[in-house]
Image (spheres, rainbow, N blue to C red):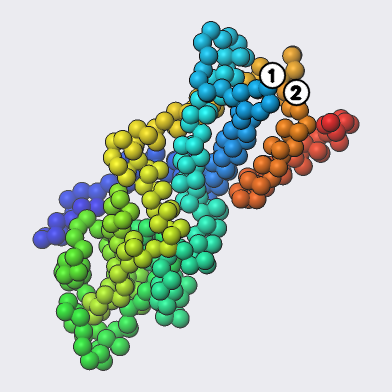
Amino acid sequence: MFVDPGTGRVLGSYVYTRTLVGFADVAHGSLMLGTFGDHMVELAACLGFILTVTGLYLWWPRAGRSGVVLPHRGLRGRAFWKNWHAAVGLWTALLILFLILTGLPWAGLWGDLLRRGTDLAGIGYPVSHRAHGAPVISATTVKDASDGAAPWTMEAAPAPTSATAAAHHHAASAGPAAGPSGSRLSLDQVAETLATHDMSAPYRLSLPKDAHGAFIAVVYPDQPEGQRTMYIDQYSGRIIDDVRYAAYGSAAKAVELGVQLHMGNYFGRLNQIVMLVPCLGIIFLCVSGPIMWWRRRPKGQLAAPRALARPTMRILALITLVLCLVFPLAGASLLLVLLIDMGVRRWRGMPRPA
């Protein structure tokens, strides 16, 4: 909503999710299906990571065979698809893995586990932030207090609190922009306080949720080094905390940097072009992979292609098992598929695979 600051007249409004960019944003993160869609996107990303790593293993040169580096000309049929699949996969694999890893921090399950783990290890949000929050709202996170405006690093941190109106009334002194005794600061006073502390627009300003909450101002530029989250006492105008990128833990810094590179923001148009390469690679691999599977299946049957050599299968199984421990949602899905496969085989009286 756009409001004239002088008259208070509403000049216009729009709903972000009804714009093309907003639609793409929500669809990219959750397929417009809420939590279920978020888990499906996460599952696809995790399985994509496993497929890429195992694909690199299958490509890796071994005795009597070298991996394809450049596509060969003049090939036809299955050989053509296999050759191009290997070459495109090789040249885009690292970027695909980077794209997946830098997107997963926003996933519902894996992202939450990552955030909890880094915070517990003291390499996420600043450790000093743990001291904030009165017991009555100690469970309130910065994400909830700021309506999701906070950087990824700060989302799970306890939200700092303002002194109560009564405490402010009896305080001996107040901040330079303090409002009338016991009253909340106006937005003009908050803006003045932010300007005094060298926080210039654009920034996101979240209002206090209740009598204990604080104003939260967030600067979220394309370069994460400029990130800044400031908390202002809603009564006195005192700066409760001023958190900058330099105060983040090492893991949080890496995540914030990765997110901006993932979105193509960090170094402008070139960043977007570089990130476009793995996207095109994924599209091609998603087409060539099923075609290869179809051409390798038993002739005239809708069945799995012939199994690879036993040593190769064992190593692939080990790689998959390790990655399933790293990505539990993918592990759970593969376990479910395995159980269904075993059940169907038993029901149809089929022999166990050799």
Which one is earlier in the sequence, the residue at label 1 or at label 2? 1
The residue furthest front is 63
Numbered mark located on residue 296 in the image:
1
Tell which of 163 and 119 is nearer to you.
119
Residue to which mark 2 is pinned: 306
Q: Give the residue displayed 57% in from the left and 14% down from the top.
A: 80
Asked if the residues shown at circle 1 and circle 2 are in contact, with their CB atoms under 8 angstroms apart, the answer is yes
- Work out whether 206 lies above or below 291: below
| Mark 1 secondary-structure assignment | helix
Check disc 2 and give the amino acid type: Arg
Q: What distance separates the C-alpha of mark 1 from that of mark 2?
A: 7 Å
Residue 40 picture location, percent across and down: 56, 43
Circle number at residue 342? none
Which quadrant is home to the C terminus? top right
Q: Amino acid at mark 1?
A: Arg
Residue 252 falls left or right of residue 121: left
